[in-house]
């Protein structure tokens, strides 16, 4: 399959992901997210097409989010771009490319759910972790224990922050971020996980500085969703770890 066709597939997968996002917790029980007392209108076939699906969602009254017009095309274009790049960056065999694209799709959905709700639902993070551990035993050119070690380290690194946050009743870090980090460790393996977490912390830290600066000007309700930055770091590490590692070794 040529990368262009894979990108087109990503557009359609992105449309499906938008529906997954709309119907995933806490979207499915927060009042005002899904219309109350109104039966959603049946979508027409063209309203499922990429880049125009936002009109179908709006007219069906399924998702009255103010940022609906941004999120729908953003999910579809992001998925298409990563699918197209994956053709060049992920090694054979074909089954590894296919399962990696499944991982990417779930990660994209989690990133946008967290952006809108600051919540990472177990219905996506736990299957991602479980499938990641199973697949890790069969990843080419990687030791069988890498996935288990990565999952354990990914969980352990952020566990203290979530635990302390619970004890202090302050949103230091959510348990969804801990489970997502463990899932990334299972998918990537131990060494690529460190790159993913480094990038996630770096990007998330830069955003945190901006957010805290905004609070000085009265924007006190801004919450930092950390999941999207972990997802960015994870996808970059999945696609470019070897290239980045070769570049670093060449600089030493």
Image: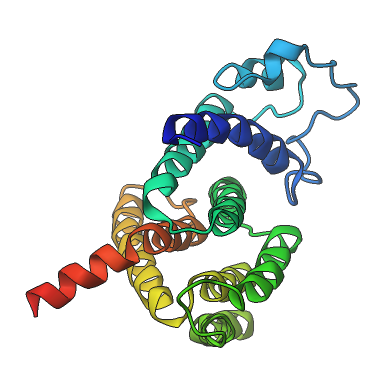
Report the side of 34 relative to 198 (left or right).
right
Report the side of 26 relative to 87 (left or right).
right
Q: Position of residue 78 (x, y in %)?
A: 46, 38
Q: Give me the residue at 58% from left, 45% from top.
A: 116
- Asked whether 72 or 106 is in front, the reply is 106
Q: Give me the residue at 33% from left, 50% from top.
A: 214
Residue 60 can be seen, yes or no: yes
Q: Quadrant of the C terminus?
A: bottom left
Using the image, determine if residue 9 lies above or below residue 119: above
- Asked whether 149 or 233 is in front, the reply is 149
Residue 74 can be seen, yes or no: no
Exactly how many numbered labels are in the figure? 0
Using the image, determine if residue 195 lies above or below residue 63: below
- Asked whether 75 or 11 is in front, the reply is 11
The image quarter in which residue 23 lies: top right
Q: Position of residue 20 (x, y in %)?
A: 71, 42
Report the side of 235 relative to 101 (left or right).
left
Using the image, determine if residue 135 lies above or below residue 119: below
Q: How is the image coloured?
A: rainbow
Report the side of 16 relative to 230 (left or right).
right
The image quarter in which residue 51 lies: top right
Using the image, determine if residue 180 lies above or below residue 82: below
Q: Position of residue 55 (x, y in %)?
A: 64, 15
Q: Give me the residue at 48% from left, 42% from top.
A: 83
Q: Position of residue 133 (x, y in %)?
A: 65, 76
């Amino acid at each position: 399959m040529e990368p262009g066709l894979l990108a087109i597939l990503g557009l359609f997968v992105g449309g499906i992901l938008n529906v997954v996002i709309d119907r995933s917790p806490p979207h499915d029980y927060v009042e005002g997210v899904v219309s109350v007392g109104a039966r959603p209108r049946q979508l027409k076939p063209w309203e499922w097409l990429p880049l125009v699906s936002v009109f179908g969602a709006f007219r069906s009254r399924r998702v009255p989010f103010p940022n609906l017009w941004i999120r729908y095309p953003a999910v579809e274009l992001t998925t298409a771009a990563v699918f197209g790049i994956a053709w060049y960056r992920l090694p054979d065999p074909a089954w590894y490319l296919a399962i990696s694209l499944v991982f990417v799709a779930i990660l994209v959905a989690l990133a946008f759910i967290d952006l809108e709700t600051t919540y990472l639902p177990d219905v996506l993070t736990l299957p991602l972790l479980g499938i990641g551990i199973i697949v890790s035993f069969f990843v080419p050119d990687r030791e069988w224990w890498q996935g288990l070690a990565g999952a354990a380290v990914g969980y352990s690194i952020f566990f203290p922050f979530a635990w302390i946050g619970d004890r202090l009743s302050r949103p230091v870090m959510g348990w969804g971020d801990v489970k997502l980090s463990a899932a990334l460790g299972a998918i990537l393996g131990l060494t690529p996980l460190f790159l993913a977490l480094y990038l996630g912390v770096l990007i998330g830290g830069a955003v945190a500085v901006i957010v805290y600066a905004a609070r000085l000007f009265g924007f006190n309700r801004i919450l930092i969703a950390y999941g999207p930055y972990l997802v960015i770091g994870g996808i970059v590490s999945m696609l470019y770890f070897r290239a980045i590692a070769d570049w670093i070794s060449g600089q030493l």
